[in-house]
Structures are given as structure tokens and as C-alpha cells.
Amino acid sequence: MVGIFISEGSTVGIYKAALVVAGMLVLPLSAFNQIFPPVASRLYTNGKTAELQSLYQQLTRWIFTVALFFALGAIVYSKEILFIFGEGYTDGSSILVLFALGQLANAAVGPSGFLLMMTDHQYLSLVNRWGLGILNVICNYVFIQEFGVIGAALATASVLALINFARVAEVWYTEGLFPYSRRFVKPIVAGIATGLIMYGFRSLFSGYPLLVVGGGVGFCVFSALLLAAGIEEEDHEFFSMCVSYVRDASVTHD
């Protein structure tokens, strides 16, 4: 739709670059979602609702935590990241910020979409996907006419966030499962502090040095703050389960 309604080829290229970069933020979601469906299906079938609720919260929190750091980098260093594609691409920094926020909202709901399917609500999931597609087309058409390429990014990010949080509400309404707990405060606080520190490096560096130094220090600070806040015992069990799953999958593949 951007290509149809916006004639400038360079603008379409900038939009595409920002979209690709922001799409990398959901890699943690995709990775963890490989583990969740079979485990969730087994727990649901055996009636272990408490265990399913715990897994749902843990997975959502860690997906959000990992995606949060990358989203911070995409937001704070949006121009520097797009400069990798060429100097003219830095004009898409606002587009990248909007997409990063939309994908962060996507990661923040964890495996809610898969949970709907694993709990026999696949038709509700189908409605969500159709709703996402139709609403995205309508909003893109309206917003592009009004705001141009920024409108396209705003429409897509807004619809993505809306549909994903609708999934959270649907899971809560149909199964009584909720992905959030007070433990989400830890990554949020760590993210705010890390974002401020990464932004502060803008006064000391620019370009590629800013990406390397600011990103490296930001990662160390974010990790240190999470460790200082403490790793829950259930998190150790969770990662042990993930390692076991990956090991078993590797053996089966071999």
C-alpha cells in the first residue's frame, strides 16, 4: 500500500528498511514459541491450569525482557541503525521508532496467540488474524492519505498492538489465564535506567562508535540490573526446561 499511494521510490525503500529492522525484535518471541505449544497443550489436556498459568507468565516476561533491550536500541539509536543502509535512510528514524513500539507490544503479550489455539480457541485466533489484516488495510489507507509514510507506520504499529492486547483479553476471558505479574517491574525498571544511560552516550559518541559503545554498555547495564534484582527459582527451572527441550530436539533431529 505504501508503494501504491506514495510515488517516491526512496520513501518506500526507507519504509522497508525500518520494517525489516523492527521485525528482528520478535525473534525472541519466535524462538520461545517453538517451546510453548507442545508443553501448553500437554498441561491443558492434563488439567494442570496452575502450571500453565506459571509457564505463560514466565514465557511472556522473558520474551518481553529480551525484546525490550533490542527495542531500546532501535528507539534510542534509530538514526544510527538506519545509517547502516545509507545516509538517506536516516530519514526513516521515526518510522523505525513506531515499528519498534509496535513489535515491543507484540512481544509484551508473549505466546497469547498460541495459547488460544492450544486451548481449543483456534477459530477465535482465526478471527484475530482476519481482523488484523482487514483493520490494517483500512487504517493504512486512511492514515497514508492523511499523514503519508509516517501514517503507514503508525497504522501498522497501532493495529498490531491492538490485536495483541485483544488476544490477552481473550485468553483471560476464555481460560482465566493472565500473563502479567509484579515480576514485570524488574525488566521495566531495568529498561528505563538502561534507556537513559544509552541516550546519555549520544552526547559523547556518534555513528558506529555510538552503536558499539552505547549498545555494549547498555547491554552490560541491563544485564547487571536484572541480575541485581535477582533471578527467581522458577526462572532457573524454566531455563533448565528450555535447555532440555533444545537438547532433546537436537538429538531427535540427528
Image (tube, rainbow, N blue to C red):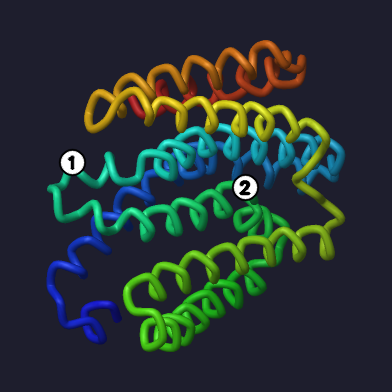
- Where is residue 73? Give x, y as percent: 42, 36
Dot 1, crowdedness within 10 Å: few (<14), some or many (≥20)?
few
Residue at (38%, 58%) from the top-left corner? Answer: 94
- Camera-nearest residue between 13 and 92: 92
Q: CA distance from mark 2 to mark 1?
A: 28 Å
Circle 1: element type: helix
Q: Which residue lies at the image location 46% right of the left edge and 32% below the top edge?
A: 199
Name which residue type carries label 2.
Ala
Q: Secondary structure at mark 2?
A: helix
Q: Position of residue 176 (x, y in %)?
A: 86, 55
In this rendered view, identify the residue nearer to me: 249 or 189: 189
Q: Closer to the N terminus: mark 2 or mark 1?
A: 1
Nearer to the camera, 21 or 43:
21
Q: Quadrant of residue 175?
A: bottom right
Which residue does the numbered mark 1 point to in the structure image? 84
- Determine whether 127 is above or below 90 in the image: below
- Reading the image, the residue beneath label 2 is 108
Q: Callout 2 environment at 10 Å: few (<14), some (14 to 19), or many (20+)?
A: many
- Quarter the C terminus occupies: top left
Query: For the residues carrying marks 2 and 1, which lies nearer the camera in this image?
Result: 1
Give the percent coordinates (x, y) of residue 29: 51, 43
